[in-house]
Each structure stands twice: as C-alpha cells, then as structure tokens.
C-alpha cells in the first residue's frame, strides 16, 4: 500500500485539526462553558479551564507562527505557555476563544492550500515540515481538549 495522494492526506489532516473524529473538538469543549468558573481548579485538576484555554491558544499560535514566519521567536517555556489560574479580565475568555479559532483556521488554510507542499522542510526550520507542525497542533489540541472536557465534568458543567 502506497502513501495517500496529497489531496487525501490534506483531507485527513484537516479532519484531524477540526476534531470530532476520535476526540472532542474545540467548539464542543468551550461552548456553554460557565466562564465565571474558568479560574476554578476542582480537586484532581492540575489546571483551571482558563489555563488550559490559554495554553491551547498560545501553543497553537506559536506553532502557526513558527510555520509561517521566519522571524518568529517562541515564548519562554514553560512560564510563557501557562498563564495564572484566573482570567485577567471578564472578556479574556471570549477573546482567547476567538484567537484560538482564528489561528486554527489559519493553520487549516495552510494545510488546505494545494500550492503548499506538506512534506517539504520549512526553510527556516531544522527539518520540520508543515505536515509535522499540523499534526503537532492536532495532537496537542486533542490532549488538552480532553483535559478541558474532564475539568468540565469535575465542575458539573458538561452536558451528558
């Protein structure tokens, strides 16, 4: 069996980025979240929902910017990838959700562009490819969205 054709590979990666197939998607995980409880860390939870959301946004943004911007400098790990437990202002949650969605759409647009070679090394990278970075985004998002769903369950804020 050979490699999937580029269009099929793009389609699979786009589906993975969207979520839903084998794990929660972003919109399901954040829709209807009781934002006033975003800073809570229930017993057994390592992070608050705010920390998970912001970590998802920051990491995805960092990977996207690395992929498309040769001058991008990543934030310091781990301190700049994990915010304080509480959102700084009331509107921070919705702002973070919008930024996450915009960056996910941008990553998906890069993958969907037939002019983009998924397997060519990123010129300013160290052997990374767009395929690798897109899979990294999908994998990282799936992991932390699973944590967010579990946290919502612990808070009693997940629809059954």
Image (cartoon, rainbow, N blue to C red):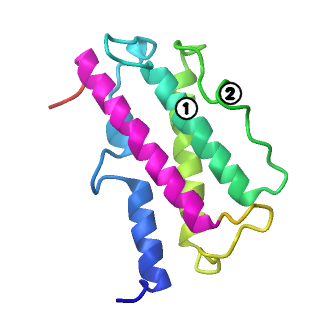
Local crowd size for mark 2, using a 10 Å CA cut-off: few (<14), some (14–19), many (≥20): few
Q: Does the magenta portion include 66?
A: no
Residue extending farthest bottom: 1
In the rendering, at what x and y percent does residue 128 appear? 66, 63
Residue 55 - label: 1
Residue in view at x 45 percent, y 66 percent: 13
Q: Residue at x 28, y 16 (%)?
A: 155
Return the residue at label 2: 80
Task: Classify mark 1: helix, strand or loop.
Answer: helix
- Residue 133 location, quadrant: bottom right
- Residue 46, compared with residue 61, is above or below; it is above
Range covered by the magenta-colored residues = 129-156
Q: What is the x, y in percent for residue 12? A: 40, 70
Q: Is residue 133 magenta?
A: yes
With 5 as the anchor, is 75 left or right in this view?
Answer: right
Image coordinates for residue 52, horizontal then vertical, percent: 47, 28
Q: Residues within 10 Å of mark 1 (few under 14, many from 20)?
A: many
How many dots with numbers? Answer: 2
Name the image quarter holding the C terminus: top left
Q: Nearer the viewer, residue 115 or 148?
A: 148
Residue 132 visible to an observer of this rendering: yes
Would you say residue 157 is visible in this rendering?
no
SS assignment at label 2: loop
Q: Of helix, strand and loop, which mostly describes the magenta segment?
A: helix
Mark 1 touches mark 2? (CB < 8 Å): no
Q: Residue at x 74, y 41 (%)?
A: 74
């Amino acid at each position: 069996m050979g490699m999937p054709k580029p269009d099929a590979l793009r389609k699979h990666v786009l589906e993975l980025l969207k979520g839903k197939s084998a794990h929660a998607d972003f919109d399901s995980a954040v829709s209807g979240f009781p934002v006033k409880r975003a800073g809570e860390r229930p017993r057994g939870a390592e992070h608050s929902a705010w920390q998970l959301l912001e970590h998802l946004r920051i990491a995805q943004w960092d990977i996207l910017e690395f992929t498309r911007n040769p001058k991008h400098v990543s934030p310091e790990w781990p301190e700049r990838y994990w915010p304080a437990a509480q959102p700084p202002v009331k509107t921070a949650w919705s702002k973070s959700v919008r930024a996450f969605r915009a960056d996910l759409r941008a990553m998906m647009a890069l993958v969907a562009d037939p002019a983009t070679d998924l397997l060519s090394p990123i010129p300013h990278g160290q052997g990374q490819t767009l395929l690798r970075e897109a899979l990294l985004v999908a994998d990282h998002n799936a992991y932390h969205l699973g944590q967010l769903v579990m946290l919502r369950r612990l808070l009693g804020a997940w629809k059954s």
